[in-house]
Amino acid sequence: MNSSTSSFRTEWKVLAVLAAVLALCECAARLAADYLDYDRVHIAQFTNISRDLHESEGTRVLFFGNSLTMHGVELDEVRAELARLGADDSCAIDRFVPVGTDVTDWIYIYERFFRNVDQAPDIVIVGFAGHHMRDLKPPKRLRRLGGRFLDLRDVPECFSTDVLRFEDQAEVLISRGSSMFGDQLIYREATLYGLLPQFQASERRLNHILARRKDAQAAGNPEKPTFTRARRLAKLIKDTGARGVFIAMPLTYVWDADPEVQQIVEEMGMTYIDARKIDGITPDDFPDGYHMGEKANGVYSRFVAAKLAEQLKTVER
């Protein structure tokens, strides 16, 4: 056996071992994907939540949004307030509130877990603040969009309207096929959190500062923001037969609302509620400077329940 043949076989053995290691890592990543953090545990339940809402006998109510709604709406408090108000107590209430999402994610989440499976709720309550309803370019968190939210049948729509660059499209598709690639960022974050105990809290505070600065910059930016995705989301909800309720949520400051969002919502025959400032909620009621604490949570949940009770009087299953 000459040296070139021996070298060739050695290289193939190395490649085979490497492929086996990568396959093993991918299998492990897929098994761990739904349990990496509380957000992914929640996302893993989307199929069950959608199905259970669809199969319920009462009016089906979905709270839709991100961590603002997760921390701002306590479902048990909403149910208790509905009972106190004498509203329909047979309604089924649940939520889709993945962390860090905005209108782009919400479109594809709703398409995948409700429209595409013909399991729409009766009432969809969309909570948002700041820039959440604006057309951000490019969309945030492409790997999670591809790996968790995007239905393959909606890829043409996504690539023609929202994710336009080839490298971004490749990132979305690879994330769809590989959990190891799609969840790479959380493994990196976990390593940093383990090595630097204060990193996570500092990162969260910095993200909130940057989000507020982005809103301030957008307010003073001569380039007018666009809202084509907000219109698509409202139309999507309407086309599935659901009633949309869009709520501008409170923050530690009264942020500048985009009048275009209210106009779009009302043109679609849906309800827009300005809840940026609610009696009983103060800046001190946001422990991390962005999300509502326990006191504000109770006030806001009862506020939303009262608005929901009005909707339940007229909704038809």
Image: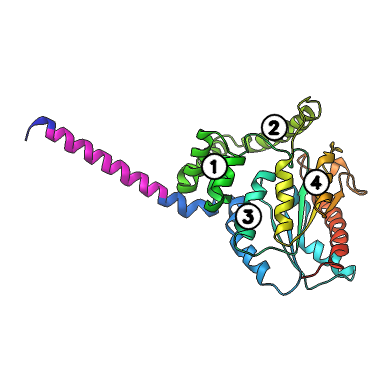
Of labels 1 and 3, earlier in sequence is 3
Kindly identify which residue carries mark 4: 264
Kindly identify which residue carries mark 2: 206
Q: Nearer the viewer, residue 156 or 105?
A: 156
Regarding mark 4 in the picture, which secondary structure is present there?
helix
Of labels 4 and 1, earlier in sequence is 1
Which residue: 62% across, 50% down? 108
Amino acid type, mark 1: Arg
Which residue: 77% across, 50% down? 127
Kindly identify which residue carries mark 3: 111
- In the image, which is nearer the foreground, mark 4 or mark 1? 4
Q: Nearer the viewer, residue 91 or 259?
A: 259
Q: Nearer the viewer, residue 270 or 176?
A: 270
Of labels 2 and 1, earlier in sequence is 1
Of labels 4 and 2, earlier in sequence is 2
In the image, the segment drawn in magenta is 5-26
Which residue: 54% across, 47% down? 155
For the residues bearing labels 1 and 3, Cβ distance under 8 angstroms: no
Kindly identify which residue carries mark 1: 143
